[in-house]
């Protein structure tokens, strides 16, 4: 190895101490490889953060990763069992709600054309993302898909209505945190494909995307993962800024406090945050330059009673009107942290605009949506206790919300 630093020389340098980096470091140790983990922040866990305190009380809220299942997501489920972490099945057994953009009525579209076109868009995406012989399996068709935005792809393939396209906008916002006109059709369709298809990602039954939550919060994972590492290999407050190749001997990672040298590096975050020397190849550069961070806000609204259940709803909704595109019942009904609450998901352009509102306007806008969706338009403020907002957009190393970036058009060469 050509370079030695204060921390030493390592076979592998892991960048990021989240739910990918920590298990990766443990596996590398088991393989007998000397490893160091560099984490920019002063804590582990990445975009997993469960609790917050308001006016002297602790309210459990998942600001980051929240849902998983015990079938298709076998790795995280196996890890949960190994660490003794318990799951809770998400409440989705009673009716959910759907709000149209021009009314508070909780029904299907009144227009048969709108309904049929929404179904056509859904079926198109489901077929493309689950067909083993479809366009996502063809190199030439993948290249063509990367020249189109998701919005453009839908307009070319379905003669849909404004309302039907608005439904696809909600899917784009909830899955990857951006509007359909911002993301490559290839990226979002491939993302849905690896998740098992649109229906599997959006449903809430066993094997689907939103089947379970973690009883003690997802923040129950990081500390036990750290305990499995060799003491001293985790370095907090060590943001990586560049990767420099040292002739043929390896790579040197430069951070704010010094330099660590390693033969290989393992990244868990967006590569556009780093400077590479020598420069990446043209194809890799196009990919890096085409990555964007999603705008994604979780807004927790706490109540003193589950009024939506009294009205016959499970607390799951999709909305084409207002700031939040999706609401989910995120209540905790066991232990000292019992509370009744919704998590509102605000994403894409709506998140960018909403983030500039005063706190009082943010609160009133979401309460109005909840009143319309779950209480027949009657004000739910009498039951309101507190609202909490995810703060990823203001933290230096977390960038805007979701833990993964998306790509714009022509990013894959």
Image: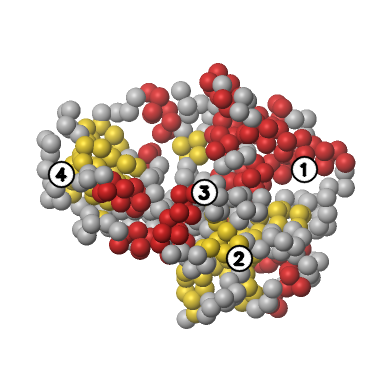
Q: Secondary structure at mark 3?
A: loop
Q: Left or right? Give the position of 356 relative to 395.
A: right
From the image, tell me which residue sits under label 3: 73
Residue at 56% across, 53% down: 69
Residue 96, located in which quarter of the rendered image?
Answer: bottom right
Please state the horizontal and vertical placement of residue 78, each as a whole percent of the image. 45, 54
Q: Secondary structure at mark 4?
A: strand
Mark found first going from the N terminus, 4 or 3? 4
Residue at 43% across, 55% down: 79
Residue at 49% across, 79% down: 57
From the image, tell me which residue sits under label 4: 9
The furthest residue to the top: 140
From the image, tell me which residue sits under label 2: 330
Mark 1, Cα crowd under 10 Å, few <14 / some 14-19 / many 20+, is some
Real-space Cα distance between discs 2 and 4? 45 Å
Please state the horizontal and vertical placement of residue 49, each as a whole percent of the image. 45, 62
Mark found first going from the N terminus, 2 or 1? 1
């Amino acid at each position: 190895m050509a370079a030695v630093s204060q921390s030493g020389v390592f076979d592998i340098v892991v960048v990021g101490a989240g739910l990918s980096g920590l298990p990766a470091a443990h596996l590398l140790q088991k393989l007998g490889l000397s490893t160091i983990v560099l984490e920019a922040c002063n804590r582990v866990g990445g975009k997993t953060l469960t609790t917050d305190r308001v006016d002297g009380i602790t309210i459990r809220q998942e600001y980051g990763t929240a849902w998983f299942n015990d079938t298709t997501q076998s790795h995280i489920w196996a890890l949960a069992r190994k660490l003794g972490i318990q799951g809770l099945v998400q409440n989705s057994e009673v009716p959910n709600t759907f709000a149209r953009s021009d009314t508070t009525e909780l029904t299907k579209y009144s227009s048969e054309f709108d309904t049929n076109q929404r179904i056509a868009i859904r079926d198109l995406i489901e077929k493309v993302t689950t067909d083993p012989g479809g366009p996502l399996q063809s190199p030439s068709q993948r290249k063509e898909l990367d020249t189109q935005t998701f919005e453009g792809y839908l307009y070319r393939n379905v003669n849909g209505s404004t309302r039907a396209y608005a439904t696809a906008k909600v899917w784009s916002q909830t899955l990857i945190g951006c509007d359909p006109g911002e993301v490559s059709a290839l990226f979002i369709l491939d993302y849905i494909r690896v998740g098992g298809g649109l229906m599997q990602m959006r449903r809430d039954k066993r094997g689907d995307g939103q089947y379970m939550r973690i009883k003690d919060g997802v923040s129950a994972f990081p500390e036990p993962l750290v305990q499995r590492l060799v003491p001293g290999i985790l370095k907090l407050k060590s943001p990586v800024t560049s990767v420099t190749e040292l002739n043929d001997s390896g790579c040197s990672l430069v951070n704010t406090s010094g330099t660590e040298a390693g033969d290989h590096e393992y990244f868990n975050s967006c590569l556009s945050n780093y400077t590479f020397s020598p420069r990446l190849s043209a194809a890799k550069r196009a990919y890096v330059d085409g990555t964007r961070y999603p705008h994604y806000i979780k807004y927790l609204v706490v109540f003193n009673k589950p009024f939506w259940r009294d009205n016959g709803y499970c607390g799951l909704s999709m909305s084409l009107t207002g700031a939040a595109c999706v609401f989910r019942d995120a209540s905790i009904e066991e232990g000292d942290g019992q509370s009744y609450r919704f998590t509102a998901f605000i994403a894409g352009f709506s998140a960018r605009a909403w983030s500039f509102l005063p706190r009082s306007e943010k609160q009133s806008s979401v309460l109005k949506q909840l009143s319309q969706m779950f209480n027949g338009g009657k004000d739910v403020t009498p039951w309101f206790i507190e609202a909490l907002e995810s703060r990823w957009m203001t933290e230096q190393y977390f960038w805007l919300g979701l833990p993964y970036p998306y790509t714009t058009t022509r990013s894959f060469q």
